[in-house]
Image (cartoon, grey):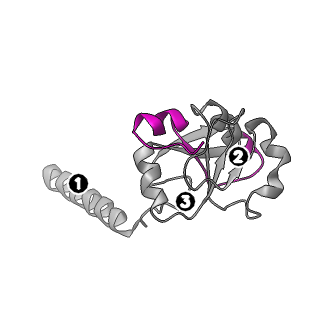
Amino acid sequence: MKKINLLSLLLVMVTILSLSACLSSPTSTSDSTSPQIGKVIKVDQGSYIDISVPEFQKMMENKDFTLVNVHVPFEGDLPSTDLSIPFDTIGQNLDQLPGDKSGKIVLYCRSDRMSNIAAQELVKLGYTNIWNLDGGMVAWEQAGLPIER
């Protein structure tokens, strides 16, 4: 009798887990907290997403974001760069960024040190859809891709 009850309980648990998996909604790449690409970087007051060069190239196929070079001094741009704002003045130049704080913004710099700082600042200021090119222009060039000088 105990074996039957244990087996029944196990069957009920498996059924509940299976149903809950079927009912959960899929994640979307527009949700910056659980993307299908990239790596979520948790910081004070939120998070941003680090993306690799191949992931960034895929995003560029249907560009739906503002691309910002935050490197100082200027050493060139990636193709299709929209803005250049020094990383250490990003908070004073919010008027250049999308007015909607949930608008997608991709940041990059030479190596990704400055863009990480800028990403953290924007998250602190309430921006919720910040992406960072991991490795920056160095990784871009190492992949054999051009920099606009």
Residue ID at (53%, 42%):
147
Give the camera-side residue of 35 and 19. Answer: 35
Name the spot of residue 33 as percent of width and height, x first.
55, 52
- Looking at the rendered structure, the secondary structure element under dot 2 is helix
Name the spot of residue 103 as percent of width and height, x first.
66, 62
Q: Are marks 3 and 1 in contact (CB under 8 Å)?
A: no
Graded by Cα atoms within 10 Å as few (under 14), some (14 to 19) or many (20 or more), the crowding at tag 3 reads few
Give the camera-side residue of 73 and 28. Answer: 73
Q: Are marks 2 and 1 in contact (CB under 8 Å)?
A: no
Magenta-span inclusion, residue 122: yes
Residue 72 is labelled as none
Residue ID at (14%, 56%):
4
User: Three-letter amino acid code at disc 1?
Assistant: Leu
Name the spot of residue 75 as percent of width and height, x first.
64, 35
Which of pointers 2 and 1 indicates the residue nearer the eye? 2
Residue at the spot of label 1: 10
Which of the marked residues, 3 or 1, is nearer the chain's N terminus? 1
Which of pointers 3 and 1 indicates the residue nearer the eye? 3
Residue at the spot of label 3: 31
The residues colored magenta run 121-149
Q: Are marks 3 and 2 in contact (CB under 8 Å)?
A: no
Alpha-carbon distance for marks 3 and 2?
Answer: 14 Å
Graded by Cα atoms within 10 Å as few (under 14), some (14 to 19) or many (20 or more), the crowding at tag 1 reads few
Residue at the spot of label 2: 123
